[in-house]
Amino acid sequence: MIRLGRIADLFAKHPVSVSKKDADDKDKDVDKATNKKTIAIITSSILHEGNAALKNTLIGLCVLPIGIAFFWLFANSLHLTEAGTIGGLPALIHALIVMEIALLPLLYYMIKDGAAAIRKGGRIRALIGKFNNKKQKDLDKNWISFETYNFFIVRDWTPFWTLSATSSADIMAEDKMLVKEVEAVEKHVKAKSSSPDEVVLKKDAAGDLETVAKMSNLEGYREFVYFVFNFIAFYGYLLGIIVYYYDQEGEKQPDFVRNLKLGYSNADADWGGNFAGDMMWTLEPIAILVFPLIFKRIVQSSSVGKTKTD
Protein backbone atom coordinates (compact mmCIF):
# COMPACT_ATOMS: atom_id res chain seq x y z
CA MET A 1 0.00 0.00 0.00
CA ILE A 2 2.89 2.35 0.74
CA ARG A 3 4.35 1.73 -2.70
CA LEU A 4 1.00 2.30 -4.38
CA GLY A 5 0.73 5.60 -2.53
CA ARG A 6 4.08 6.71 -3.91
CA ILE A 7 3.11 5.63 -7.44
CA ALA A 8 -0.19 7.49 -7.20
CA ASP A 9 1.60 10.64 -6.04
CA LEU A 10 4.10 10.42 -8.90
CA PHE A 11 1.37 9.91 -11.46
CA ALA A 12 -0.81 12.68 -10.03
CA LYS A 13 2.02 15.21 -10.32
CA HIS A 14 2.40 14.81 -14.07
CA PRO A 15 -0.15 12.42 -15.57
CA VAL A 16 -0.01 14.07 -19.01
CA SER A 17 3.61 15.06 -19.33
CA VAL A 18 4.93 11.78 -17.95
CA SER A 19 5.36 10.46 -21.51
CA LYS A 20 7.15 12.04 -24.41
CA LYS A 21 5.16 14.21 -26.82
CA ASP A 22 6.75 14.77 -30.20
CA ALA A 23 3.79 14.45 -32.52
CA ASP A 24 3.08 16.72 -35.50
CA ASP A 25 0.16 19.14 -35.45
CA LYS A 26 -2.01 16.82 -37.55
CA ASP A 27 -1.61 14.07 -34.95
CA LYS A 28 -2.37 16.20 -31.91
CA ASP A 29 -5.98 15.10 -31.71
CA VAL A 30 -4.95 11.46 -31.89
CA ASP A 31 -2.29 11.96 -29.24
CA LYS A 32 -4.73 13.81 -27.01
CA ALA A 33 -7.26 10.98 -27.21
CA THR A 34 -4.53 8.39 -26.66
CA ASN A 35 -3.21 10.26 -23.65
CA LYS A 36 -6.69 10.54 -22.16
CA LYS A 37 -7.24 6.79 -22.50
CA THR A 38 -3.79 6.10 -21.05
CA ILE A 39 -4.49 8.23 -18.00
CA ALA A 40 -7.80 6.45 -17.46
CA ILE A 41 -6.16 3.01 -17.75
CA ILE A 42 -3.27 3.82 -15.39
CA THR A 43 -5.58 5.48 -12.86
CA SER A 44 -7.98 2.53 -12.88
CA SER A 45 -5.10 0.11 -12.44
CA ILE A 46 -3.71 1.99 -9.42
CA LEU A 47 -7.16 2.25 -7.82
CA HIS A 48 -7.82 -1.43 -8.47
CA GLU A 49 -4.53 -2.45 -6.88
CA GLY A 50 -5.09 -0.07 -3.99
CA ASN A 51 -8.42 -1.69 -3.19
CA ALA A 52 -6.87 -5.14 -3.45
CA ALA A 53 -3.98 -4.14 -1.17
CA LEU A 54 -6.37 -2.71 1.41
CA LYS A 55 -8.49 -5.86 1.33
CA ASN A 56 -5.43 -8.10 1.71
CA THR A 57 -4.24 -5.99 4.64
CA LEU A 58 -7.59 -6.35 6.39
CA ILE A 59 -7.65 -10.08 5.71
CA GLY A 60 -4.13 -10.42 7.09
CA LEU A 61 -5.13 -8.54 10.24
CA CYS A 62 -7.98 -11.02 10.71
CA VAL A 63 -6.00 -14.17 9.89
CA LEU A 64 -3.22 -13.34 12.37
CA PRO A 65 -5.34 -13.56 15.56
CA ILE A 66 -7.07 -16.67 14.20
CA GLY A 67 -3.68 -18.31 13.75
CA ILE A 68 -2.62 -17.36 17.27
CA ALA A 69 -5.89 -18.61 18.76
CA PHE A 70 -5.38 -21.94 17.00
CA PHE A 71 -2.76 -22.69 19.65
CA TRP A 72 -5.50 -23.05 22.25
CA LEU A 73 -7.62 -25.18 19.93
CA PHE A 74 -4.67 -27.49 19.41
CA ALA A 75 -4.02 -27.59 23.15
CA ASN A 76 -7.69 -28.39 23.75
CA SER A 77 -7.42 -31.34 21.34
CA LEU A 78 -4.65 -32.66 23.58
CA HIS A 79 -6.85 -32.02 26.66
CA LEU A 80 -4.33 -29.57 28.07
CA THR A 81 -6.97 -26.93 28.80
CA GLU A 82 -8.90 -29.44 30.89
CA ALA A 83 -5.85 -29.79 33.12
CA GLY A 84 -5.84 -26.05 33.72
CA THR A 85 -2.61 -25.35 31.83
CA ILE A 86 -2.08 -22.34 29.48
CA GLY A 87 -5.00 -20.57 31.10
CA GLY A 88 -7.38 -23.51 31.18
CA LEU A 89 -10.93 -23.38 29.86
CA PRO A 90 -11.33 -19.57 30.25
CA ALA A 91 -8.33 -19.00 27.99
CA LEU A 92 -9.83 -21.37 25.40
CA ILE A 93 -13.13 -19.48 25.46
CA HIS A 94 -11.35 -16.14 25.08
CA ALA A 95 -9.38 -17.56 22.15
CA LEU A 96 -12.64 -18.74 20.55
CA ILE A 97 -14.17 -15.29 21.00
CA VAL A 98 -11.19 -13.71 19.26
CA MET A 99 -11.49 -16.23 16.44
CA GLU A 100 -15.22 -15.59 16.03
CA ILE A 101 -14.74 -11.83 15.83
CA ALA A 102 -11.87 -12.14 13.34
CA LEU A 103 -13.82 -14.64 11.24
CA LEU A 104 -16.77 -12.32 10.60
CA PRO A 105 -14.94 -10.03 8.12
CA LEU A 106 -13.53 -13.10 6.37
CA LEU A 107 -17.03 -14.51 5.90
CA TYR A 108 -18.08 -11.19 4.40
CA TYR A 109 -15.17 -11.20 1.94
CA MET A 110 -15.89 -14.80 0.93
CA ILE A 111 -19.38 -13.79 -0.17
CA LYS A 112 -18.17 -10.55 -1.75
CA ASP A 113 -15.27 -12.18 -3.63
CA GLY A 114 -17.46 -15.06 -4.79
CA ALA A 115 -20.08 -12.72 -6.19
CA ALA A 116 -17.40 -10.52 -7.78
CA ALA A 117 -15.78 -13.50 -9.51
CA ILE A 118 -19.13 -14.63 -10.93
CA ARG A 119 -19.90 -11.10 -12.11
CA LYS A 120 -16.47 -10.96 -13.75
CA GLY A 121 -17.25 -14.13 -15.66
CA GLY A 122 -20.51 -12.59 -16.82
CA ARG A 123 -18.76 -9.37 -17.91
CA ILE A 124 -16.18 -11.33 -19.89
CA ARG A 125 -18.92 -13.21 -21.74
CA ALA A 126 -20.69 -9.93 -22.42
CA LEU A 127 -17.48 -8.48 -23.84
CA ILE A 128 -17.01 -11.55 -26.01
CA GLY A 129 -20.49 -11.11 -27.43
CA LYS A 130 -19.90 -7.41 -28.04
CA PHE A 131 -16.40 -7.50 -29.58
CA ASN A 132 -16.15 -10.94 -31.21
CA ASN A 133 -15.08 -10.56 -34.85
CA LYS A 134 -15.85 -6.83 -34.73
CA LYS A 135 -13.62 -4.27 -36.40
CA GLN A 136 -12.58 -1.14 -34.55
CA LYS A 137 -14.29 1.15 -37.03
CA ASP A 138 -17.60 -0.51 -36.13
CA LEU A 139 -17.20 0.23 -32.41
CA ASP A 140 -17.49 3.29 -30.23
CA LYS A 141 -14.31 5.36 -30.31
CA ASN A 142 -14.03 5.10 -26.52
CA TRP A 143 -14.12 1.31 -26.42
CA ILE A 144 -10.61 1.11 -24.95
CA SER A 145 -10.79 1.02 -21.13
CA PHE A 146 -8.91 -0.58 -18.28
CA GLU A 147 -10.97 -3.75 -18.67
CA THR A 148 -10.73 -4.05 -22.45
CA TYR A 149 -7.02 -3.18 -22.31
CA ASN A 150 -6.44 -6.17 -20.02
CA PHE A 151 -8.53 -8.55 -22.09
CA PHE A 152 -7.95 -7.46 -25.71
CA ILE A 153 -4.73 -5.44 -25.96
CA VAL A 154 -2.28 -6.72 -23.33
CA ARG A 155 -3.63 -9.93 -21.84
CA ASP A 156 -2.89 -10.29 -18.10
CA TRP A 157 -1.21 -6.88 -17.95
CA THR A 158 0.92 -6.69 -14.78
CA PRO A 159 2.59 -3.30 -14.29
CA PHE A 160 5.31 -3.11 -11.67
CA TRP A 161 2.98 -1.71 -8.99
CA THR A 162 0.61 -4.69 -9.03
CA LEU A 163 0.59 -7.31 -6.28
CA SER A 164 1.39 -10.11 -8.73
CA ALA A 165 4.37 -8.33 -10.29
CA THR A 166 7.86 -9.11 -9.02
CA SER A 167 10.13 -6.11 -8.99
CA SER A 168 13.29 -5.40 -7.02
CA ALA A 169 13.55 -1.78 -8.09
CA ASP A 170 14.30 0.74 -5.38
CA ILE A 171 12.26 3.83 -4.61
CA MET A 172 14.51 6.10 -6.68
CA ALA A 173 13.86 4.05 -9.82
CA GLU A 174 10.07 4.09 -9.51
CA ASP A 175 9.74 7.42 -11.36
CA LYS A 176 11.60 6.08 -14.40
CA MET A 177 9.70 2.80 -14.29
CA LEU A 178 6.43 4.71 -14.22
CA VAL A 179 7.49 6.69 -17.29
CA LYS A 180 8.32 3.48 -19.16
CA GLU A 181 5.06 1.87 -18.12
CA VAL A 182 2.98 4.83 -19.27
CA GLU A 183 4.88 5.04 -22.55
CA ALA A 184 4.22 1.33 -23.13
CA VAL A 185 0.50 1.77 -22.48
CA GLU A 186 0.38 4.79 -24.81
CA LYS A 187 2.19 2.83 -27.49
CA HIS A 188 -0.24 -0.08 -27.32
CA VAL A 189 -3.31 2.16 -27.19
CA LYS A 190 -2.14 4.28 -30.12
CA ALA A 191 -1.25 1.22 -32.20
CA LYS A 192 -4.66 -0.29 -31.55
CA SER A 193 -6.52 2.96 -32.24
CA SER A 194 -4.70 3.56 -35.53
CA SER A 195 -5.90 0.28 -37.07
CA PRO A 196 -9.62 0.78 -37.77
CA ASP A 197 -9.87 -2.31 -39.99
CA GLU A 198 -8.28 -4.62 -37.43
CA VAL A 199 -10.51 -7.19 -35.75
CA VAL A 200 -10.58 -6.49 -32.01
CA LEU A 201 -11.32 -10.03 -30.84
CA LYS A 202 -10.52 -12.95 -33.09
CA LYS A 203 -11.98 -16.43 -32.75
CA ASP A 204 -8.98 -17.98 -30.96
CA ALA A 205 -8.75 -15.10 -28.50
CA ALA A 206 -12.49 -15.36 -27.85
CA GLY A 207 -12.03 -19.03 -26.97
CA ASP A 208 -9.27 -18.13 -24.53
CA LEU A 209 -11.45 -15.49 -22.90
CA GLU A 210 -14.30 -17.99 -22.63
CA THR A 211 -11.92 -20.21 -20.65
CA VAL A 212 -11.06 -17.25 -18.40
CA ALA A 213 -14.77 -16.61 -17.85
CA LYS A 214 -15.43 -20.22 -16.94
CA MET A 215 -12.50 -20.24 -14.52
CA SER A 216 -13.73 -17.03 -12.93
CA ASN A 217 -17.17 -18.56 -12.37
CA LEU A 218 -15.64 -21.67 -10.84
CA GLU A 219 -13.53 -19.54 -8.52
CA GLY A 220 -16.67 -17.68 -7.45
CA TYR A 221 -18.45 -20.94 -6.61
CA ARG A 222 -15.35 -22.04 -4.71
CA GLU A 223 -15.56 -18.94 -2.51
CA PHE A 224 -19.16 -19.85 -1.66
CA VAL A 225 -18.03 -23.36 -0.70
CA TYR A 226 -15.39 -21.82 1.56
CA PHE A 227 -18.12 -19.65 3.07
CA VAL A 228 -20.20 -22.75 3.90
CA PHE A 229 -17.20 -24.43 5.55
CA ASN A 230 -16.33 -21.38 7.62
CA PHE A 231 -19.90 -20.49 8.52
CA ILE A 232 -20.48 -23.98 9.92
CA ALA A 233 -17.18 -23.67 11.83
CA PHE A 234 -18.24 -20.23 13.07
CA TYR A 235 -21.60 -21.53 14.27
CA GLY A 236 -20.07 -24.65 15.83
CA TYR A 237 -17.45 -22.81 17.87
CA LEU A 238 -20.06 -20.19 18.82
CA LEU A 239 -22.04 -22.91 20.59
CA GLY A 240 -19.07 -23.62 22.85
CA ILE A 241 -18.96 -19.96 23.87
CA ILE A 242 -22.72 -19.82 24.42
CA VAL A 243 -22.91 -22.86 26.70
CA TYR A 244 -19.90 -21.61 28.67
CA TYR A 245 -21.63 -18.37 29.63
CA TYR A 246 -25.14 -19.88 29.82
CA ASP A 247 -24.29 -23.10 31.62
CA GLN A 248 -27.73 -23.67 33.15
CA GLU A 249 -30.05 -26.10 31.39
CA GLY A 250 -33.71 -25.98 30.41
CA GLU A 251 -36.05 -23.10 31.16
CA LYS A 252 -33.33 -21.24 33.04
CA GLN A 253 -31.65 -20.44 29.72
CA PRO A 254 -32.91 -17.58 27.48
CA ASP A 255 -34.97 -18.60 24.49
CA PHE A 256 -32.33 -17.48 21.98
CA VAL A 257 -29.78 -19.77 23.63
CA ARG A 258 -32.07 -22.78 23.40
CA ASN A 259 -32.81 -21.91 19.78
CA LEU A 260 -29.12 -21.61 18.97
CA LYS A 261 -28.52 -25.02 20.51
CA LEU A 262 -31.31 -26.47 18.32
CA GLY A 263 -32.83 -28.12 21.37
CA TYR A 264 -29.70 -30.04 22.35
CA SER A 265 -28.27 -30.16 25.85
CA ASN A 266 -25.26 -28.06 26.75
CA ALA A 267 -22.92 -31.04 26.57
CA ASP A 268 -24.24 -32.23 23.21
CA ALA A 269 -24.23 -28.73 21.72
CA ASP A 270 -20.68 -28.10 22.93
CA TRP A 271 -19.39 -31.43 21.63
CA GLY A 272 -21.30 -31.26 18.36
CA GLY A 273 -20.31 -27.66 17.69
CA ASN A 274 -16.65 -28.35 18.38
CA PHE A 275 -16.77 -31.44 16.15
CA ALA A 276 -18.42 -29.49 13.32
CA GLY A 277 -15.85 -26.70 13.56
CA ASP A 278 -12.92 -29.11 13.59
CA MET A 279 -14.41 -31.09 10.71
CA MET A 280 -14.98 -28.01 8.52
CA TRP A 281 -11.49 -26.64 9.14
CA THR A 282 -10.08 -30.06 8.29
CA LEU A 283 -12.01 -30.30 5.03
CA GLU A 284 -11.22 -26.74 3.94
CA PRO A 285 -7.43 -27.26 3.44
CA ILE A 286 -8.20 -30.43 1.50
CA ALA A 287 -10.60 -28.48 -0.70
CA ILE A 288 -7.99 -25.76 -1.22
CA LEU A 289 -5.58 -28.39 -2.58
CA VAL A 290 -8.14 -30.31 -4.64
CA PHE A 291 -10.13 -27.50 -6.26
CA PRO A 292 -7.36 -26.33 -8.66
CA LEU A 293 -7.04 -29.88 -10.00
CA ILE A 294 -10.80 -30.20 -10.43
CA PHE A 295 -11.06 -26.81 -12.12
CA LYS A 296 -8.24 -27.71 -14.50
CA ARG A 297 -10.00 -30.91 -15.53
CA ILE A 298 -13.33 -29.11 -16.00
CA VAL A 299 -11.82 -26.36 -18.14
CA GLN A 300 -9.79 -28.82 -20.22
CA SER A 301 -12.79 -31.09 -20.82
CA SER A 302 -14.98 -28.15 -21.86
CA SER A 303 -12.23 -26.84 -24.17
CA VAL A 304 -11.86 -30.27 -25.81
CA GLY A 305 -15.63 -30.58 -26.24
CA LYS A 306 -15.87 -27.14 -27.79
CA THR A 307 -12.97 -27.91 -30.17
CA LYS A 308 -14.72 -31.09 -31.36
CA THR A 309 -17.95 -29.16 -31.85
CA ASP A 310 -16.23 -26.46 -33.89
Image (tube, helix red, strand yellow):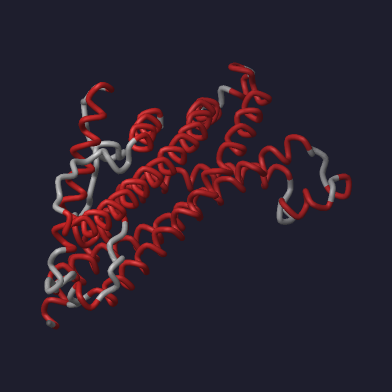
The image shows a total of numbered marks equal to 0
**Quarter in which the N terminus is drawn:** top left
Q: Nearer the viewer, residue 223 or 270?
A: 223
Is residue 271 shown left or right of residue 251?
A: left
Task: Tell me: 265 left or right of 139.
Answer: right
Residue sitting at the far right: 252
Above or below, 170 relative to 194: above
Where does residue 282 sit, x and y in percent of width and height?
A: 43, 44
Question: Camera-side residue: 229 or 167?
Answer: 167
Of 294 and 194, nearer the camera is 194
Taking the spot 73% from the left edge, 44% from the top edge, the residue there is 266
Q: Position of residue 66 (x, y in %)?
A: 52, 32
Q: Quadrant of the C terminus?
A: bottom left
Q: Looking at the rendering, which quadrant does residue 93 occupy?
A: top right
User: Most extreme residue toward the front, as rendered?
Assistant: 25
Q: Position of residue 100 (x, y in %)?
A: 60, 39
Q: Is residue 218 above or below residue 54?
A: below
The residue at the point 35 percent across, 65 percent down is 121
Asked if residue 214 lies left or right of residue 281, the reply is left
The x, y position of residue 243, in whole percent, is 73, 40
Residue at point 29% right, 37% down? Answer: 161
Looking at the image, is 62 positioned above or below residue 106?
A: above
In the image, 271 versus 127, the foreground residue is 127
| Residue drawn at point x = 72 percent, y = 52 percent | 260
Quarter-wise, where is residue 223 in the image?
bottom left
